[in-house]
Image (cartoon, helix red, strand yellow):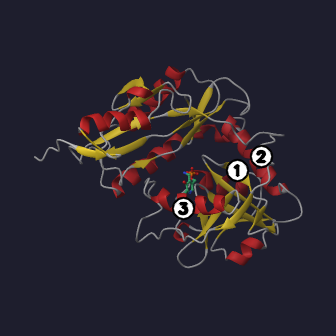
Amino acid sequence: MFIARSCVFGSKLINPCKLAFIRGRFLMSAAFHGAKFCWMDGEIIETDKAVVSAMEPIHLSIFEGIKAYVKNDVNASGKLNIFQWESHVARLWRSAAVCGMNIPYAGENLLEATRKTVRANGFSTNVYIQPRIWPRAEAPKDVHFIIPVWAFETVLGRNNPRFSKQRRFIISSWRRIASDALPPQAKAWANYGNSALAMREAERLGYDGAIFLDNRGFVSEGTGASIMTVRNGKLITPPVSASILESVTRETLLRIVSEDLGIPVEVRDITRVELYASDEAFLCGTGWEITPITSIDDLPLGDEYPGVVTKRISEYYADVVAGNVEKHKEWLISA
Ligand code: PMP
């Protein structure tokens, strides 16, 4: 086996072990997003001890984004429930299979690990849970598995000023990665290079975010969320074949919006001009929750912002994640 005795870091030649130490410290600062503890490879450790070698191959790493919400009121503090745990874990396993990784834990181990991490940090407000997996440098068939967990502020809930903030979006000049090149259906970090380019472009031009078209020129998704539009009272969203991530939130909304709110839904390709002509549009995802969009390429959407349908859906979704809708309590599991 080849063992490197030194490598270049900045302009200095240093020992790789020292580099791993420096990099690890740099990547995982003492309280990562305010979280003092994380779970790594089987145990709860302080986040500043979550150190790996800088020689790790990171291009095929995968992750999940999951949320736990305060029971009964998403804006309060109290007991937490994880939303759609099973669906997220199923997608993590699909992503691992696509990227050729074996996960050496069962779903229950990960649930227990997540609960321990939330408890270790003493969180009692909404938390974001981001399991991350990547192959080990010395044994690529084995993986590192880390679960960072941190608190976030929701855009959901009645009269939440964060929800109604103006958000000006553009259509990105970058196309969404195609499924036959780098599959967006796997939640791999590599895909987020595409997203980062689109976000940088939007920020450079003074906008709040970007929407991708797919390689056929149809509307695809946001940089970290699915897109839904409202036109003539119908909710319309692109199909999985439009190079999108199979979003857990999108699936949830497609079901509750039609079954519970009686709003017709359509899953079909959307053209760029149809998007401009929408009465309302919003992003949906675990991270973005339900985030309304004010304009696209400076064309305002509809007459009212946030739109009435978007508002109605988001208020209902807030009730679902808080456990206030009896028939959807099966999507919640205690944190
Ligand atoms: N698309 C992309 C590119 C995303 O990163 C996300 C966030 N995971 C979503 C859509 C929404 O997926 P989910 O609802 O499962 O969070």
Residue corresponding to mark 3: 197
Between label 2 and label 3, give the one nearer the viewer. Answer: 3
Residue 69 appears left or right of 14: right
Question: Residue extending furthest front?
Answer: 11
Q: Amino acid at mark 3?
A: Leu
**Considering only order in the chain, which callout, 3 or 1, is on the residue closer to the N terminus?**
3
Can residue 137 be seen here? The reply is no
The local secondary structure at tag 1 comes to strand
Residue corresponding to mark 1: 290
Label 1 near label 2: C-beta < 8 Å?
yes
Q: Amino acid at mark 1?
A: Ile
Determine the CA span between mark 2 and mark 1: 8 Å
Determine the CA span between mark 2 and mark 3: 25 Å
Q: Residue at x 48, y 58 (%)?
A: 193
Name the residue nearer the viewer: 22 or 279: 22
Residue corresponding to mark 2: 163
Q: Residues within 10 Å of mark 2 (few under 14, many from 20)?
A: many
Can residue 187 be seen here? The reply is yes
Residue 231 appears left or right of 219: right
> x, y percentage for residue 108?
41, 33
Q: Residues within 10 Å of mark 3 (few under 14, many from 20)?
A: some
Name the residue nearer the viewer: 203 or 257: 203
